[in-house]
């Protein structure tokens, strides 16, 4: 029986715990491998990020978040797809199930039975087109708002952001989200219809997935997300998404008859629900990767280097730096400094700043402005 060894290793700002013995031995060998310091540094950095991503994924209860988002997606699927298909048919983009855009949807479902799932979606939404009207569009707005708030809330929980955006910025973000849902399929159609090269046609779904994930990772969280971190997270999540399509396609091919025998005509709906759940797991894993990448390196802040990790480890210099940021902001006549501003200046996570600020307030080094809900903390003296 394999036993797990509880160890805590702090090397270049990383903290690891509860590793199996073979991983512990491998890590120690990499640390002691002096011949190739660049290779050692790469594996140390990669291993630290990987361990922290998995640790934070479990700590943030991403499986529960994925289930919640999958439920919200299924509830909003009918009105969103009905309105989108209505607009596409109005512009003549979709005429029937043989339309290139409908066929493109096959690239977003498990390979086995993907055509049946897409055909079922098209048939199901066609039944709801006749019921559209003012009430249908109002339902679309309500459902899209609920779905957007759910996605944004789960993303911000991972990023540790509890500060609400101003109304104007929140409205702009929501408007952009609605435009993506409504206009996105039109843009996809025009791009896809202009692609004649077979290689580009096969690569286009990959590019589309990477772009969509990159857009989500960089725009939905309230804190400022670096484009490099968002790009890495999108590439990893997009690649895992395509791998999951192949794996689950083969899995459904093996168990399809069992599902059909148990669920009957609802078998496709069950497969769709499982796939949406898996998709959200992959998306949230990409959010964790983006968060860990952004806050895992040596970050050169305003007053020097801060060692920070996504598991909320920070060294003494980083703590002093956060206090100096608050003091400098007040000394220069800029008034109080919010946790979000301090996090952006120091390039650390906002959740970590809140924890450090709570210790500062307990020591009466800073105090929070009365009546202010934004967590603004000027120096006490």
Image: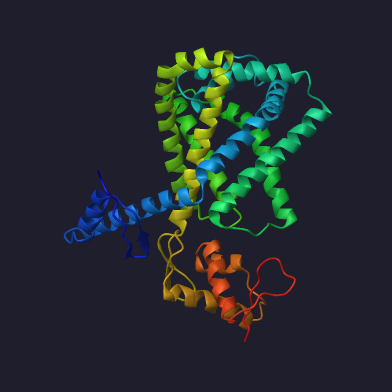
In the rendered image, the residue lying farthest to the left is 35
Q: Is residue 168 left or right of residue 242?
A: right
Residue at position x 77%, y 32% in the image: 139
In the rendered image, the residue lying farthest to the right is 134
Q: Is residue 67 left or right of residue 8?
A: right
Residue 345 in the image: above or below residue 177: below
- Give the total of numbered labels: 0
Q: Is residue 351 left or right of residue 122?
A: left
In this view, the residue in front, 5 or 275, is 5
Residue at position x 54%, y 77% in the image: 323
In this view, the residue in front, 201 or 136, is 136
In this view, the residue in front, 167 or 176, is 167
Residue 373 in the image: above or below residue 366: above
Residue at position x 68%, y 57% in the image: 164
Query: Where, quadrant-wise, is the C terminus in this rendering?
Result: bottom right
> Residue 154's spot in the image, x, y percent?
59, 47
Residue 278 in the image: above or below residue 264: below
Q: How is the image coloured?
A: rainbow
> Residue 122's spot in the image, x, y percent?
63, 18
In this view, the residue in front, 136 or 202, is 136
Query: Where, quadrant-wise, is the N terminus in this rendering?
Result: top left
> Residue 289's spot in the image, x, y percent?
45, 49
> Residue 156's spot in the image, x, y percent?
59, 52
Q: Is residue 72 visible?
A: yes
In the rendered image, the residue lying farthest to the front is 1
């Amino acid at each position: 029986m394999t036993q797990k060894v509880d160890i805590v290793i702090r090397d270049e700002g990383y903290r690891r715990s509860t590793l199996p013995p073979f991983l512990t031995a491998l890590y120690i060998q990499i640390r002691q491998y002096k011949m190739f310091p660049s290779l050692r540094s790469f594996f140390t950095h990669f291993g630290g990020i990987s361990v922290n991503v998995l640790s934070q994924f479990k700590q943030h209860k991403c499986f529960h978040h994925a289930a919640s988002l999958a439920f919200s997606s299924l509830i909003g699927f009918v009105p969103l797809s009905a309105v989108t298909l209505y607009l596409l048919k109005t512009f003549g983009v979709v005429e029937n199930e043989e339309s290139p855009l409908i066929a493109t949807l096959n690239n977003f479902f498990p390979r086995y039975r993907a055509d049946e799932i897409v055909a079922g979606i098209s048939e199901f939404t066609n039944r709801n087109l006749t019921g559209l009207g003012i009430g249908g569009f109002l339902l679309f707005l309500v459902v899209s708002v609920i779905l957007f708030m759910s996605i944004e809330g789960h993303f911000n929980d991972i990023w540790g952001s509890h500060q609400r955006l101003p109304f104007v910025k929140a409205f702009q973000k929501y408007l952009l989200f609605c435009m993506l849902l409504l206009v996105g399929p039109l843009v996809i159609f025009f791009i896809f219809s202009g692609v004649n090269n077979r290689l580009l046609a096969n690569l286009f779904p990959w590019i589309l997935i990477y772009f969509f994930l990159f857009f989500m990772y960089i725009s939905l969280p309230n804190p400022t997300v670096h484009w490099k971190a968002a790009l890495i997270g999108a590439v990893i999540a997009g690649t895992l998404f395509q791998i999951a399509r192949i794996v689950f396609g083969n899995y459904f091919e093996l168990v399809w008859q069992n599902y059909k025998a148990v669920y009957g005509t609802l078998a496709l709906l069950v497969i769709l629900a499982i796939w949406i759940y898996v998709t959200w797991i992959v998306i949230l894993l990409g959010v964790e990767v983006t968060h860990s990448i952004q806050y895992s390196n040596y970050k050169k802040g305003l007053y020097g280097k801060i060692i920070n990790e996504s598991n909320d480890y920070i060294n003494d210099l980083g703590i002093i730096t956060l206090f100096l940021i608050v003091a400098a902001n007040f000394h220069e006549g800029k008034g109080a400094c919010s946790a979000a501003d301090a996090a952006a200046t120091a390039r650390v996570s906002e959740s970590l700043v809140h924890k450090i600020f709570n210790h500062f307030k307990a020591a009466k080094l800073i105090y929070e402005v009365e009546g202010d809900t934004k967590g603004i903390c000027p120096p006490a003296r």
